[in-house]
Amino acid sequence: MRGPKGEDVCWNPTAVNDPPLNIVKGTTGYGFNLDGTTDGHATAKSCAHKKFTSPDGATAVDNQVYRILGCMYGFRAGGVSSGLISNEYRRSTGRGVMIMEITGVTDPRESENVEVAFYRAIDRYALDSAGEPLPYASYRIDASGTKERYGSKAKGRIHEGVLTTTPAEVELPSYGAAGYTELHIRDMQMTLDLTAADGKAKGLLGGYYDLETWWSGMRRSALQSSMGDWSCPATYVASKQLADGYPDPKTGECTAISTAYRFTAIPAFIAREGRVARRP
Amino acid sequence: MSTFASISRLAIGAAILIGVTGCGPQEPASTGGPATIRRLSEAQYRNTIADIFGPQIVVSGRFDSIEREEGLLAVGASQAAVTAVGFERYHALARAVAAQVIAPVNRGTLVPCTPAATDGADDSCAKIFFSRAGRLLYRRALRDTELAALVGVAHAGAESRADFYNGLSYGLQALLESPDFLFMRDATVANGSRLSPFSKATRLSLLLWNSTPDDDLLKAAEDGSLDTKAGLKAAVDRMMASPHFNRGMRAFFTDMLTFDDFATLEKDAALYPAFSLAAANDAREQTLRTLIDFLITQNGDYRDLFTTRATHITRSLGMVYRIPVAIPGGWSRYEFPEGDNHVGIQSHLSFVALHSHPGKSSPTLRGKAVREVLLCQKVPAPPGTVNFDQFNDPESPAKTARERLAVHAVDAACAGCHKLTDPVGLALENFDTAGQSRTEENGVKIDTRGEIDGIPFSNGTELGKALHDNPATAACIINRFASYGLGRTVTSGEKPWVAYLEKTFTSNGYRFTDLVRRIALSEAFYAVSAPAKTSTKSAGAAHYEGKS
């Protein structure tokens, strides 16, 4: 509420001019090469930006969201966002539990034509005594009548037990910062290692996050902002400057921002009414 | 004279039985068994309070444990006493229950009269209350002297506390602490040859409802109709149609399947994270639901319990069994697919986890449980000199339980019993200690071959078939249920009756409800032998009618 007229500056980020955000200057970051360039020069579908090299060795990957958030303690690994507000809330409330349904698997190590569909679950995580989600729980899909919500799909293949998808535009469910949000991601790519003996599959999902949708989720993080962890106005300005995908044909300003998420998936059953649930 | 009367009674009984169950063998004469004194179990105490005063009365407290005897707590209850500490607990429970009954929120419905004044005694209202409550709690009408004593207690209490209801609570406490409530004594008639009508009502009510007789059943005892075939049949029909019947049958199977052991069941959370408290609770409920649905609702063949793939599951159980659950929020029916090794109740989590160690499975414990719990066979206790060093040797090259157990085969002190248990339990080695399916142990394929009573099998599914076909399976449920109802083991004089039950159980397709009805309608179930001259393990009972 520090706007000149008492505005909430997370909801009115242009109400004040804050000092510029400290952004990531390093060269290491997770992500996918979304624009196809090696140096991040502007293309028909991207604005000029700097590239990262992934810790796993992949070069020229894009992740401008990390560039914005990477220097904020609360958004770093173990910070309040990943440790409490987002991941912990998802575990304790059961909100934002994402279901990935992989179909077309003929062989868990080698399958040429698989499809991944994304849904939101309406059941909470089943947790073990350490608070970790248990595998092989059954989850119902959020649906409106008979129509299952979300349901974005991506094509892919499994090679040597690793699933890789081809770019697709998806709408994914999410819950964080005490509120529901959506991940509207274009050119979404995903890799998922299905070879772990304990069934826990580690993956990376990235793409161009629609900037407006991204900011819609970010501005709800007023709690962290009020703690002085970050500045909404400075972040908003940075996001406008660093957005690197899908330039507006008229203004040339990019309307999407590259991002990537590391995640762990556990095997689960999808319980559909009147249908036999699929084995994971 | 008594012989003639006995023959007449049998003849009439046979005629009515034909009418009830169709043609078949007639019930043989039975000498009965000794009268018993049974201590009310915790479940019976709770059911009784709920049935008399309503489920809103909270029974919060601990009870002295009852030792399992001859496979049943119900038999152990006939040998249970009350310790000094146990009596203190009963006293605390009685105070708490009495306080709730006379509380303003309940007194309007639970006290059947309004006192002339609430700040003093009202003997006539107290008498009405104790007549009603005392009859239900003592399972017979109170004698005049008992009633007068309770009214006196209430009068003194009301006067000293200037509160009628407070006085009433003192009397109610006395009822709830009385041996006449806490112990069920078999009173007899006809020269001690059969139970009195009130004891008959109590035995029947414990058998079918695991609770005290209700008003209708006591009326049948009072007006003599319970001693007629028609009256007994009417009572049994009514009670088996009641929702309390399922509760009673659940109590029996809880006892038979040793589900009281769930109270101390633990699994290593680091090794078996899916075995949560919820999963353990649901495991117990899974088997009880399966039993009630299969045996009572569907009137299925008892033996098919060991080969059925149908069961009921929850989300917690789904994680253990690694199966999808249609309704994650509650219970749903489920049928394990062909080829899945979850076949029969012996494959349920409630069996394989309950009869295992916290950190590993146990073919020995599982085999012992199959023999003792499901087949009523005896497995001797291990010798005091048993040496587990070799079995538990961490340096042992043995990879599977079968290999580890091989050390017992060469130890004469162990081999005899392990030959009884291990070939049976090894068939269930496809389930780890937390009930999850597995095909390997330490990288070695699990061998589930075994044999039971000369019948070889290659896996748990075939073990289920062997149990289905084993004559001991049917004989066991008959023996257990009869012992459960009698509160003692079957005597030699009752063996012809048990043989009759076996014959009719077989001819009627092994229907459990038919067995229940037949036992409840049997003359033999209420027969009492002459008091033994020498002391027996079962306590003797008073021979009095309990009338004023």
Image: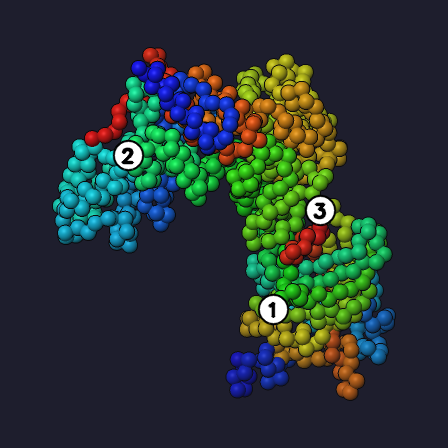
Q: Which mark is residue B223?
A: 2
Residue sitting at 31 percent across and 29 percent down? Answer: B197
Q: Check the image and report above or below for A172 versus B231.
A: below
Give B300 or B470, whichever is nearer the viewer.
Answer: B300
Do labels 1 and 3 touch, CB within 8 Å?
no
- Residue appearing at x 23%, y 34% in the figure: B142
Residue A3: quadrant of the picture: bottom right
At a point 82% along the width and 64% down the height, the residue shown is A166
Q: Which residue is mark 3?
A: A198
Looking at the rendered structure, the kind of residue marked 1 is: Tyr
- Quarter-wise, where is residue B275 in the image? top right
Report how far apart the C-alphas of labels 2 and 1 lie in the structure. 69 Å
The total number of labels drawn is: 3
* Three-letter code for the amino acid on which mark 2 is drawn: Asp
Q: Residues within 10 Å of mark 2 (few under 14, many from 20)?
A: few
Does the residue at mark 2 contact the one at mark 3 (Cβ under 8 Å)? no
What is the chain letter for disc 3?
A
Name the residue rendered at 67%, 75% in the picture.
A213
Q: Foreground: A1 or B440?
A: B440
Query: Residue B177's spot in the image, x, y percent?
Result: 28, 35
Report which residue position mark 1 lands on. A180
Q: Position of residue B326 (x, y in %)?
A: 62, 52
Spatial separation of the CA atoms under disc 2 and disc 3: 68 Å
Please say whether residue A122 is visible from this viewpoint: yes
Q: Considering only order in the chain, which callout, 3 or 1, is on the residue closer to the N terminus?
A: 1
Under circle 1, the secondary element is strand
